[in-house]
Each structure stands twice: as structure tokens, then as C-alpha cells.
Amino acid sequence: MISLTLHVWRQKDSASHGGFMAYRLAGVDESMSFLEMMDLLNEQITESGGEPIAFDSDCREGICGSCSMVINGRAHGPGHFCTTCEVRMREFRDGDEIWIEPFRSVAFPPIKDLMVDRSAFDRVIQAGGYVTVHSGPKPDPNTIPISHEISELAMDAAECIGCGACVAACPNGSAMLFTSAKINHLNILPQGQPEAKARVLGMVEQMDSEGFGSCTNHAECQDACPKGISIQFISEMNRQYRDSSLRKPKKVRGQLESQ
């Protein structure tokens, strides 16, 4: 068992000013996950008549990406290729001070305490439209041959869980890694080709309109990504955007399609 001093960002709502509050927490089992430790802290706060700390969580298995916290200045906390819920308290020592704050970005407005609004990501995805090529039950998915190299590359991009750590880690608050992953996991497959040009134009322009910063190749996004998404997808997205910009898109049936 270890004892910790926790400095947690508390903010009543998006219109209020926030600040760090210190809590002393004893009896923390080193086998606990970080979120289990936060649950323990909330029990202590509630028992003393206080208001529990608001934070996002869902699957607690490193799948959903909702557990967005910056721990000691690092998105998702210590370790690589893991989300906040996968961080174990054995990463810390007895008597440690831990600073916990929300993901910070102009495009991620605060909601309460450690919770932020990441619906900007949803709007970026929506701007990409849909895939018109039928890819339903078998045998349809198997009618278009795809090389192993291409399918593996698409799967690498599709691993993105949309957690926002790339934005939180980037000094510019850029969402280029997220956007490029979402674009490329469709655009590099044959099924995604009919809308490929319109998809990259729509998603990049939506990303810019949401207030995310630009990429200046710090590569902090790649380092913070719990799924290890490569920045090579940013280069590929930039190439696709340049080529697609040479053709004027038109709007057909509520979705962008290139002429």
C-alpha cells in the first residue's frame, strides 16, 4: 500500500475558472489501475461530504479512449502504448505527488473537472461522408482483392481510438494524427477510392474549422498515442490533400464527391 498527494484540476463548469486542489490519499494498492485509484479518491471525497471529481471512463480496457487525463504533464500518464485506464499504480512510489488535469485544447472545451468536450472529433469524422461501395456480408468483402501490405497498413490506421492524446501532447494542439488515421484507413483501401478525394478535403477542412493547430513535426503525437499510430499517415494525408485540391468537389446526395 502506498500514500499519495494528488493535485487534481477542479472546475465547476465551462464558464467557471478552475484550479488545482490537493488531496491526500492513503491505502492505495499498487495493483490498482489509475481509474480505480480515482474511484477510491472519489469515495473519500464523498464520505467527507464533498463533490466527487468528474472524469470520463467507459470500457476501462484501453479500447474506447474516453479516459482522457494528463498525468504529470503526459497525456494518459507514464508508459507507452497505454491509456489512462491501463496505467497501474505500481508506476508510482509511496509519497509521490501526482498532478492530474484534463486534455487541453481550444477545440476541446472543458465541461467539468477532468471532462472535456471532444465532439469536434465526431464532426471531423462526419465530414468524411460514407463508403458507397457495398462491403456487407460475405461474399461481398472478398470480391475485391487487397494485398496483405495494404490491408495491414489500413489496419494500422484503423487502430486509432479517437482518444485525443495526440492533440493534448502536441504543442500546437494539432489533430493531424487523428485525422490522417481516420482518412487513411478508408482511403488506402479499394472500397474507399470512390470518395477518397472528397473525404480528405472535407475532413481536413473540418479539422481546420474546429480550431485545431497545425503540425510542425514535433512527433509528440506519435509518442503519446496509446495505439502507436505512425506520423507517416500525416505525410500521406498531406499528399492526398494536395492532389485532391487540384479538383473541385461538388455536393451530391448530401455527401461530397469529386468531379
Image: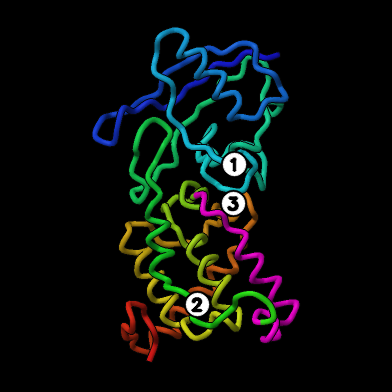
Q: Residue furthest bottom?
A: 259
Looking at the image, residue 161 sits to the left or right of residue 46; the answer is: right
Q: Within the magenta stretch, is there residue 156?
A: yes
* Residue under numbered circle 1: 59
Sequence-wise, which precedes: disc 3 or disc 2? Answer: 2
Span shown in magenta: 140-163
- Taking the spot 50% from the left edge, 19% from the top edge, the residue there is 42
Is 224 situated above or below 4? below
Can you say which quadrant of the picture contains the C terminus? Answer: bottom left
Sequence-wise, which precedes: disc 1 or disc 3? Answer: 1
- Taking the spot 38% from the left edge, 52% from the top edge, the residue there is 119
Can you say which quadrant of the picture contains the N terminus? Answer: top right
Q: CA distance from mark 1 to mark 2?
A: 28 Å
- For label 3, the crowd category at 10 Å Cα-Cα, with few meaning under 14, some 14 to 19 and many 20 or more, is many
Looking at the image, residue 27 sits to the left or right of residue 127; the answer is: right
Looking at the image, residue 90 sits to the left or right of residue 202; the answer is: right
Q: SS of the residue at dot 1? A: loop
Q: SS of the residue at dot 2? A: loop
Q: Quadrant of residue 185?
A: bottom right
Q: SS of the residue at dot 3? A: loop
Sequence-wise, which precedes: disc 1 or disc 2? Answer: 1
* Residue under numbered circle 2: 131
Disc 1 residue type (three-letter): Cys
* Residue under numbered circle 3: 225
Q: Position of residue 129 (x, y in %)?
A: 42, 73
Q: CA distance from mark 3 to mark 2?
A: 26 Å
Is 11 situated above or below 197? above
User: Relative to the observer, which residue lies in front, 171 or 10?
Assistant: 10
Q: Position of residue 152 (x, y in %)?
A: 71, 71
User: Relative to the observer, which residue lies in front, 49 or 93?
Assistant: 49
Q: Position of residue 143 (x, y in %)?
A: 68, 86
User: Relative to the observer, which residue lies in front, 58 or 109?
Assistant: 58
